[in-house]
Amino acid sequence: MNQEALFARTLEQVKEQAADQGGWIDEEEVQEAFAPLGLSGDQLQMVYDYLVKHRIGIGGPVNPDDYLTEEEKNYLQNYLDELEGLPQASPGEKEAVTLSAMAGDMDAQGRLAIFYLPDVVEVARLYSGQGVPLEDLIGEGNLALTAGVSMLGALERADEAQGMLGKMMMDAMEDLIQQQQTTEKADQKMAERINKVLEAARSLSEELHRKVTVEELAQETKLSEKAIRDAVRLSGHQIEYLEEF
């Protein structure tokens, strides 16, 4: 196995070990794992930085709030202040309301959703720093909670509600993050295509000493004419080396 493949496999093993340990790993464990590769101190530091970036603590669990921007921290504090004014429930009351919600009582479902709003915040904090603003994560979690309290009739026991609602919140936030990442990849791909069209148009224009046509550029880049026109439109028609179409 070559050095790059061994490094990638070792990194995955370290991430799996950290997951088994609750999301963190000791420096000594990382050093031991990578010892066969003979990494330098700087290279090991890059591994530590990579792990922390991916929410794996070094020497202890990460603090979710470390991944919040100042704006998100201010939003979180204001939101938590608002939640303090909401009704609180004792364990017994919460169980009674849960049972009523399971029986289809819509008022009870609404009250239960309010009781679980702080849980949405805690879950959202765990998913912060992954490309989606905290406010959007909380909003998505609240939507999942609202839907979830109306679906509790499928449960057999009240003590199953928290697990079900928590999973729905997590699934909703994970889906939102995945959608964001997919969008970012598509945007990056389009940006790369625009740059490719721009550079090809500039090069061909300089070679021919004139503006070039879409047809000529398609032959040069092996892109379809539609793809080139789409790139030009998305650039705001800022590719000056192309004739207007």
Image (spheres, grey):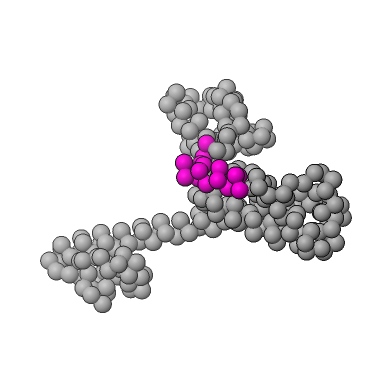
Q: Residue at the spot x=48%, y=59% of the render?
A: 183
Numbered marks: total: 0
State the residue in front, 124 or 15.
124
Q: Residue at the spot x=55%, y=38% of the render?
A: 65
Q: Give residue 187's quadrant in the image.
A: bottom left
Quarter placement of the C terminus: bottom left
| Residue 21 against residue 158 in the figure, above or below | above
State the residue in front, 58 or 163.
163
x and y, in percent, of residue 129 in the image: 52, 44
Q: Is 210 displayed left or right of 116 in the figure? A: left
User: Is residue 32 visible in the rendered structure shown here?
Assistant: no
State the residue in front, 179 or 224.
179
Q: Residue at the spot x=51%, y=50% of the render?
A: 133
Q: Residue at the spot x=66%, y=53% of the render?
A: 169
x and y, in percent, of residue 154 in the image: 82, 60
The reply to whether the magenta stretch includes residue 221 is no
x and y, in percent, of residue 243 in the image: 21, 73
Residue found farthest to the left:
209
Residue found farthest to the right:
156
Residues in magenta? 66-82
Q: Is 187 displayed left or right of 215 in the figure? A: right
Secondary structure that dominates the magenta span: helix
| Residue 41 against residue 208 in the figure, above or below | above
User: Is residue 45 visible in the rendered structure shown here?
Assistant: yes
Q: Give residue 150's quadrant in the image.
A: bottom right
Residue found farthest to the front:
85
Q: Is 23 displayed left or right of 238 in the figure? A: right
The reply to whether the magenta stretch includes residue 67 is yes
x and y, in percent, of residue 158 in the image: 84, 51
